[in-house]
Amino acid sequence: MSGSRVLALGHYQPARVLTNDELATMVDTSDEWIRTRVGIRTRRVAAPDETVASMAARAAAKALAASGLDPADIDLVLVATCTAVDRSPNTAARVAAELGLASPAVMDVNVVCAGFTHALASADHAIRAGAATNALVVGVEKFTDVTDWTDRTTCVLVGDGAGAAVVTAAERPGIGPVVWGSVPEMGHAVRIEGTPSRFAQEGQSVYRWATTQLPPIARRVCERAGLAPEDLAAVVLHQANLRIIEPVARRLGAVNAIVASDVTESGNTSAASIPLALSKLVASGRIEPGAPILLFGFGGNLSYAGQVIHCP
C-alpha cells in the first residue's frame, strides 16, 4: 500500500443546547452581540457525567460501525484533545477499552485546535511506514470544563463534542501531504493554564494572524496535493469563529467549495471542530464520494496543520 484514506466518519454531541439568550442571563452579553462578533447561535454543553473519553468513544463507535471493520482490525488509536483531565490511562487507551479493541497502539495528541489534523497526518504517516493498517483518529473536547463563565470574550465561544475518522491503508492515497508548523513566540496568544485550568486568548492577535498568515499556507496545502483551490469541493477549517472562517476561505480562493460553518450551531470545540464539522457535512450528502476536501486546523501554540482528503 502506498498511502491511506479516510474510510468512515462519526460524531457525537451532548444533548444540552446553550443558546445565546441563555448566556445573556449569565454574563453581560446578548444574542446580537455574539452573532455579530463570532457568528455563533448555539453550542453544546456536556453533562457532569460525560467525560472526554466517553464522548470520544461514542464518536469513535459510530465511525467504526460505519467503516465495516471489526474492532480487532484497528491497530492504532490517536485521540486529539487538550481538555482530558486524566493522564493515565490516556484517552486513547480508554477509547480502546470501551470499544473492545484488541491490542492497538494508543496515543493522545495535544496540539489544541490543530490537534485533529496533526493526528490524522500522524496516522497517515504510520500507515505509509507500515507501522499500522487501520487507525482510529478522534478529536474531542470538553471545553466547558476550562471556561471562565464570567469572561464574555471567551465563554460565548466554546462548546463540547467529538468527531472521529477510521483511516485505512490504500493503494491510491486519499490523504494528501500535510503542511504543518507553528509560531512558538506567539504561543501565549491562546492559553489553557493554571489550577484550575482556564481558557484565555488574545483575540485580536489571533484574528490578525489567522486572517493574514494562514491563507497562503492553506494554498500551499492544495499545491502539495496537486490541486488548485478552485478544484476543492469543500473546505473544513477549524471552527473557531465565523468571522475568521469566512475571510480565510475567501482569501484562499476556493470559489467552488462548500465552506463548513458548523461553528454557528456547535461553537468552538477546539480539536473536535474539524472532524465534527466534516462528519456532519459528509452525512448531509452534499459532497460526492472521492471529491477533494481541504482540512485545515489552527490555534493554540499558534500551531497549524492541513491536508486534502478524498471524501469517503
Image: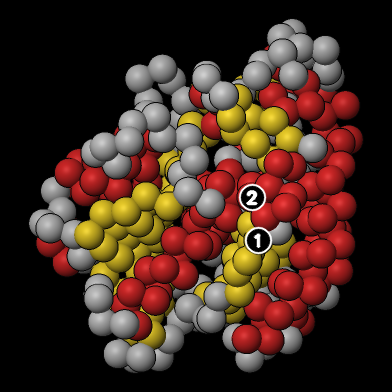
Q: Which residue has dot 1 on it?
A: 182
265 to 137, vertically: above or below: above
- Assess whether mark 1 and mark 2 are in contact (beta carbons under 8 angstroms): yes
Q: Position of residue 11 (x, y in %)?
A: 44, 48
Q: Quadrant of residue 106?
A: bottom left
How would you rate the neighbour count of disc 1 (Cα within 10 Å): few for under 14, some for 14-19, many for 20 or more?
some
Please state, as top left, top right, bottom left or bottom right, where the N terminus lies in the image: bottom left
In the image: residue 24, left or right of residue 142: right
Q: Position of residue 138 (x, y in %)?
A: 40, 52
- Give the residue at x 12% y 58%: 103
155 to 214, vertically: above or below: above
169 to 260, vertically: above or below: below
Q: Quadrant of residue 40?
A: top right
Q: Position of residue 305 (x, y in %)?
A: 60, 65
| Measured Cα–Cα span from mark 2 to mark 1 | 7 Å
Q: Which residue has dot 2 on it?
A: 301
Please state, as top left, top right, bottom left or bottom right, where the C terminus lies in the image: bottom left
In the image: residue 117, left or right of residue 78: right
Q: Earlier in the sequence, mark 2 or mark 1?
A: 1
Residue 160 visible somewhere in the drawing = yes
**Mark 1: which amino acid?**
Ser
